[in-house]
Image (cartoon, coloured by chain):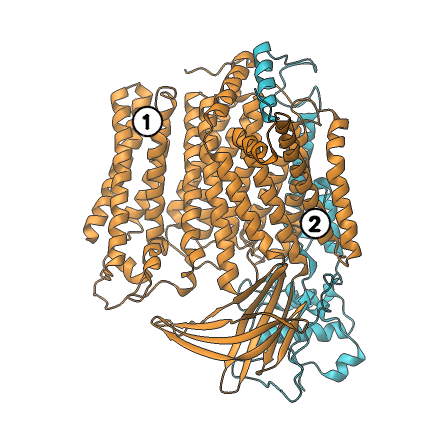
Amino acid sequence: MRRSGGGTTGRPWPRGAAGAVRVVALATAVAVSGAVGEARVRAQAPLPGSAPIGATMGATPGATPGATTTGATIGAAPVDPAAASSTPVDEAEVLAVARGLNCPICQGRNLVECPLPVCAEMRDEIRARLAAGADRAAIIQHFVDYYGPAVRNTPPMSGLLGLAWWVPLGLLVGGAWLVARIVRPGAGPGVAMATGQGDIESPYAAALERMVADRERGETP
Amino acid sequence: MAELGYGSVAAAFGAAVYAAVASAVGAWRGAPGLVQSGRRALWLSAVLGTAAVAVLEISLYRHDFSIAYVWKTSSLTTPGLYLMTALWGGQEGSLLFWSWLLGVFLSIALARPWRADVGLLPWFAAVGASIMSFFLGLVVFQANPFARLDVLPADGNGLNALLQHPGMAFHPPMLYLGFTGLAVPYAFAVAALITRRLDASWLSASRRWLLVAWLCLTIGLALGGRWAYDVLGWGGYWGWDPVENAALMPWLAATAFLHSIMAEERRGLFRTWNVALVLLTFCLSLIGTFLTRAGLVASVHAFAQSDIGDSFLAFTIVVVAGSLALLLWRLPLLRATVRVESVVSREAAFLGNNLLFMGALFAVFWGTTFPIISEWVTGQKVTIGPAYFNRLVLPILGAAVLLMGIGPLVAWRRADARSVGRLLARPAFLSLALVAALVAGGVRQPTALAGFAVSAFAGAATLLEIARGVRARRRLGENVGTAFVRLVARNRRRYGGYIVHLGVVVLAVGITGNAYKTEAEGALREGDVLTSGAYALRFDGFEQASEPDRQIDRARFTVLQGDRSVGTVAPSRQLFRNREEQPMTIPSVLHRPLGDVYALLGGFDPEAGVVTVKVHVNPLVGCVWLGLLVLALGTMLAAWPDGREQRVLDAELARLLAGRSSPRPTAA
């Protein structure tokens, strides 16, 4: 029976990592460089109580959903069972690589989302290269050489295109430096007073501030 | 009919131009008569705009296909609701709608009593009317929605079927409300810069309008996400598409402003920065619109190509350059006279907040424009996909969520680090306990754990802060319910803000859930089962139906959890009349407490008895919608006018400015 439900994953981490958060802002730079360093996919731990992730196609004996007119093979690259068993390829890794590459025909869809046959072929090629022992960077480089840099949907960290990453990070660090300067006592732009004693408030303003503070604490004014 | 509509727009354009000129000249020369006539002209322009919108709506409902726009965006079979929304279903109508909303907003803003702001408002009217003139000018000269067809078609082309969804019906107008709402604080800021009245008056006017605009943007973004989720079928709600980014950028800038403005109200701090943020927010809404409408960046949004790009570019450049020049010109007036005294202070927390939001904003901007810049500079075409934004922007926003838990607990000026530490100990402990529990329960992904930890920390900190307020009131002898209601009612801005923060926490939890999305795809015969994550789909059979405007092919599935049936899904393929070449696959979603089961048809072949289906399991996605809802409600609470509180703050700010600033901002 032909295996037709190949396309399951947990999400490779970045896209889904939505909201999941690297904690410290100023460590963002480190976090990001780390992120790209992690050329491997993280193994997806299933949610508690969930079945093992992995599409298991309907195991009704005798039911052999063959190719349909609409091309039922969308996410289902036919894998040669012999090859697959000799060098086991991590399907999650295939999908992770595929997710980083764009369909060369339709703009803005990655190889996993795109239903075109060319993308299925490209996924097969990824699987074959992984089976041959190539690492992720080499596979991506192969496709970049073939289709041009637009095929990858995440710019590399190095080279001219690396500016995509480093300029915003640089500005964030620069902004942090600026903030640190403003906050540093006795320095920073726009400081009129020389020492920490600077701005003694008028008694009236102090009273108002107290009043507002009291009100905000929920006590009667 | 069309002539009446076009005439109204043309007259509205004339009135807006007159309003701009008369207000500016009147304010310059100090001629109250001229100023008053300008104000009336602006109102007239808004009325004429309303008439034009009414004419277009009537033409849509009467199926007047002699008008090209009506033919393009509706048909005889278009349902009533979508006849109304066809007003913004195409570019010409959108621009008319935009101009009209702007007219209405400016009219409302100008209706406020003039006594206090008599110096500010003429310039406000001049700036507002100028912006309005530009948009009405586009409608009159470049994108006329009342243009006639040479032949009279029997039926219309019909609204793009993808857009026939309640979310899409109200997503564009909410965004337009947001964008036009941003023009009001912008006009106030420019007027304040011109007149040098950089005091409490422009600030409080701007804050309220900006908050309303921010709310509309939030709702607009939420509806857009919901529409994408329900209709587009890729299983997500946010794809970092340039058009989405274009709406997100002003939202981020406005969020920063809504926080840092508190430092100005309370301490007279960051005055330059706040003016700059208001100017930036509006400029970003123009830049975003230009980027997407001019077709510079590839986008899934269909309106990307259009010919208003050049005019828009010229206008955007004028606005950005003008704002910058004005700001630099008035810089000496904006010097803060107090400063941030300690790292452990509310002021410093707001600075941190602004740093993070600006960082996220720039990352979004850079990622959106990088393909253009790269192609321009190196000739290399590159694409920047969602992974880039998720890696770069989400950690920054996550840090903002963390700060959200800390900031409100820190006192102004100089807080005692130890007492802040004491307040934060319990949230930190709760958050660590949650992480431990999750790890024990099998959650291992670092990003997911970080997301849940940060959310739990900020949520607990906020809830405990609210609880402290309730306890304080209970000492006055109120029961818990009364204490809570009075607490919130008497400090709407503060507690409305906390409710918004809780909404953000829930939203963050929902986004974190993405880490455990699973998807599967397969070709099934009746009785076959496809498993994804904790769920499985069993194919039950085909179903075909015919409706007046479309043919629907459905496949029915039972959703199984283990061996138990928990519901059904029926994804469909819909063929709209006149658009048979473009079948639409509409996903079907089963909402479960801990996540959605989301099914989409790939292939449909009843003769062979095979259906191809793609199923996504999206954990916690419901939190996204719930969080956005809470956030919107909290904003409404915070934005509700509270005269008492505002008066106290205004008095305090006036006091701060008068008492401390050396170059007192006086009228020239």
* Above or below, comparing residue B599 to residue B69 in the picture: below
**Chain containing mark 1:** B
- Report which residue position mark 2 lands on: B452
Residue B498 seen anywhere in this rendered image of the structure = yes
CA neighbours of label 2 inside 10 A, class few (<14), some (14 to 19), many (20+) = many
Q: Earlier in the sequence, mark 1 or mark 2?
A: 1
Q: In the structure shown, which secondary structural element does the residue marked by tag 1 occupy?
A: helix
Image label count: 2
Q: Colour of chain B?
A: orange
- Which disc is residue B533 wearing? none
Residue B195 higher or lower than B515, as above or below: above
Along the line of sight, the residue nearer the viewer: B279 or B166: B166
> Which residue lies at the image location 48% right of the left edge and 35% below the top edge?
B639
Q: Is residue B498 above or below residue A30?
A: above
From the top left corner, tell me how far across and down residue B382 is, in percent. Answer: 58, 58
Amino acid bearing label 2: Phe
Percent position (x, y) of residue B320? 46, 37
Question: Dot 1 corresponds to which residue?
Answer: B24
Amino acid on which the number 1 mark rests in the picture: Ala
